[in-house]
């Protein structure tokens, strides 16, 4: 009888390569769909079976669970509850959730070098790769729409992929002159996402005084 009053969430923190790109697990600074597009299955008592085809993020899971428990979502939470889209999917189109999702990946160079030093002779292939390509794990930010993916790496050039024509993300079109307007729009969206994703309550004491 536990299923009648138990919320169950099955999900993953990241995907894995399965031979793609000649890799068998994951790469910390990679934003390919096989790494960033992960499964999530949620069972809530009384909730009808439904699916969401829209763009959602892992940060949506916490507010969704709070909502399912009848609890309020604290201020400053960037995720949003998916419960309304699951409770009555016909009345809420998936594309209302958000126009894009973002992902942060990679390490600071100092951290990567420190890990390599600590690992020493026990360092695996990922750490050894850093010796040949020190920037291979640089901090990375991705913005993905339904049709395109824009990737920015610290110290590197922009990357742009047409996910409709190139679902395996093998052809970077950021340098194509015809991609200029699209690239500019995605760059603006990414900047907005970074600004809106920052701490919304930097000075809680001031907020209390104003209230």
Image (cartoon, rainbow, N blue to C red):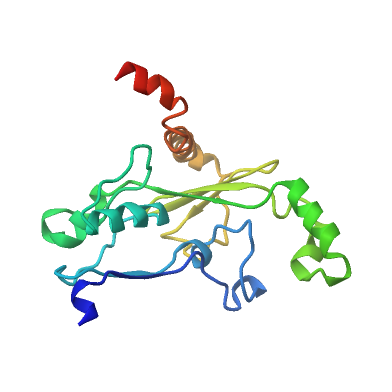
Residue 177 vertical placement versus 129 (above, below): above
Residue at image coords 46%, 24%: 203
Residue 160 vertical placement versus 164 (above, below): above
Left or right: where does residue 106 sit relative to residue 148? right
The quadrant in which residue 208 appears is: top left
Q: Nearer the viewer, residue 112 or 103?
A: 112
Residue 155 x, y percent position in the rendering: 70, 41
Q: Nearer the viewer, residue 48 or 33?
A: 48
Residue 134 x, y percent position in the rendering: 79, 52
Q: Quadrant of the C terminus?
A: top left
Residue 32 vertical placement versus 152 (above, below): below
Left or right: where does residue 84 sit relative to residue 131? left
Residue that extends furthest to the top in the rendered view of this protein = 210
Residue at image coords 29%, 54%: 66
Left or right: where does residue 180 sit relative to residue 76? right
Residue at image coords 33%, 42%: 74
Residue 169 x, y percent position in the rendering: 53, 61
Residue 50 x, y percent position in the rendering: 20, 69
Q: Quadrant of the N terminus?
A: bottom left
The quadrant in which residue 41 appears is: bottom left
């Amino acid at each position: 009888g536990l299923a009648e009053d138990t919320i169950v969430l099955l999900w993953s923190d990241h995907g894995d390569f399965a031979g793609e790109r000649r890799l068998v697990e994951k790469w910390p600074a990679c934003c390919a769909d096989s790494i960033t597009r992960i499964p999530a299955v949620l069972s809530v008592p009384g909730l009808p079976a439904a699916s969401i085809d829209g763009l959602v993020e892992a940060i949506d899971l916490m507010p969704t669970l709070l909502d399912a428990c009848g609890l309020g979502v604290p201020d400053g939470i960037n995720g949003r509850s998916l419960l309304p889209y699951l409770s009555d999917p016909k009345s809420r189109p998936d594309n209302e959730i958000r126009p894009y999702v973002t992902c942060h990946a990679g390490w600071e160079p100092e951290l990567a070098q420190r890990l390599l030093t600590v690992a020493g002779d026990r360092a695996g292939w990922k750490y050894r790769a850093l010796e040949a390509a020190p920037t291979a794990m640089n901090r990375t930010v991705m913005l993905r729409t339904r049709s395109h993916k824009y990737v920015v790496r610290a110290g590197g050039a922009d990357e742009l992929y047409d996910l409709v024509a190139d679902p395996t993300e093998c052809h970077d079109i950021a340098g194509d002159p015809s991609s200029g307007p699209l690239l500019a729009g995605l760059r603006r969206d990414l900047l907005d996402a970074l600004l809106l994703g920052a701490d919304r309550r930097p000075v809680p004491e001031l907020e209390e005084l104003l209230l």
